Image (spheres, rainbow, N blue to C red):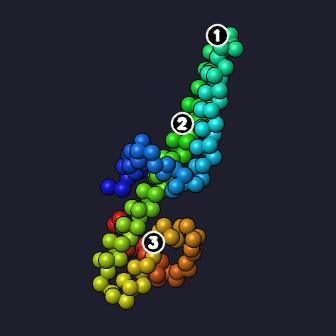
Amino acid sequence: MFTADNFRRIFDSENRKGFDLASRFFPTLEPLTSAVKDKVKELRQLRAQQAALSPDQFSQQAAALKKELADLKAHKSSSIDDELEAVSLKVLLDTILKRRINKLNVGRLKKRLKPYKFETGFEERRFHNFSARELQTIVEAWKHV
């Protein structure tokens, strides 16, 4: 099924293979990815300067950087989960809509409704005005979902 958990498994699997799906499909996550990369770079630079620092200074600074890195990774992970949940919902709603449309007996109505998708309606901010009768028909169609 197209659940957020299954999408996350695919996402993690593809990332382990070296495919950066976050920047490819979710450009809004790019600042989070950059922040994680920058923090890793800071940690490497600190390790390179380890000889010049006292052991206490190094351990304190390393612990602080590691905590910041863990926080950034957790924030990025939760943002990815949110994005994948939204994708899952779009796929699920589109699947339910297609099934409902295919069950219709009226060919003309079926033909008019087929091009509609929740995903494109959401992304394009599409609005529709319905009469009271049309709205009642829509409500009846969705009662048993």
* Mark found first going from the N terminus, 3 or 1: 1
* Mark found first going from the N terminus, 2 or 3: 2
> Where's the C terminus, which quadrant?
bottom left
Task: Look at 64% across and 17% down and name the residue there.
Answer: 50
C-alpha separation, residue under disc 1 versus residue under disc 2? 28 Å
**Residue type beneath disc 3:** Lys
Residue occupying the far bottom of the picture: 108
Between label 1 and label 2, give the one nearer the viewer: 1
* Mark found first going from the N terminus, 1 or 2: 1
- Label 1, secondary structure: give it: helix
Which mark, by number, is residue 132?
A: none
Q: Is residue 20 visible?
A: yes
C-alpha separation, residue under disc 2 versus residue under disc 3? 33 Å
- Label 2, secondary structure: give it: helix
Residue occupying the far top of the picture: 55
Does the CB distance between marks 3 and 1 fall below 8 Å? no
Q: Position of residue 51 (x, y in %)?
A: 65, 14
Q: Quick one: label 3, few (<14), some, or many (20+) residues within 10 Å? A: some
Q: Quick one: label 2, few (<14), some, or many (20+) residues within 10 Å? A: few
Which mark, by number, is residue 117?
A: 3
- Label 3, secondary structure: give it: loop
Query: Eyeballing the image, is 43 above or below 76?
Result: above
Which mark, by number, is residue 55?
A: 1
Task: Look at 48% across and 56% down and name the residue there.
Answer: 86
Task: Look at 32% across and 55% down and name the residue there.
Answer: 1
Q: How many marks?
A: 3
Q: Quick one: label 1, few (<14), some, or many (20+) residues within 10 Å? A: few
**Residue type beneath disc 2:** Ala
Q: Which residue is mark 2?
A: 74
Q: Position of residue 141 (x, y in %)?
A: 37, 73
Q: Quadrant of residue 124?
A: bottom right
Q: Quadrant of residue 101?
A: bottom left
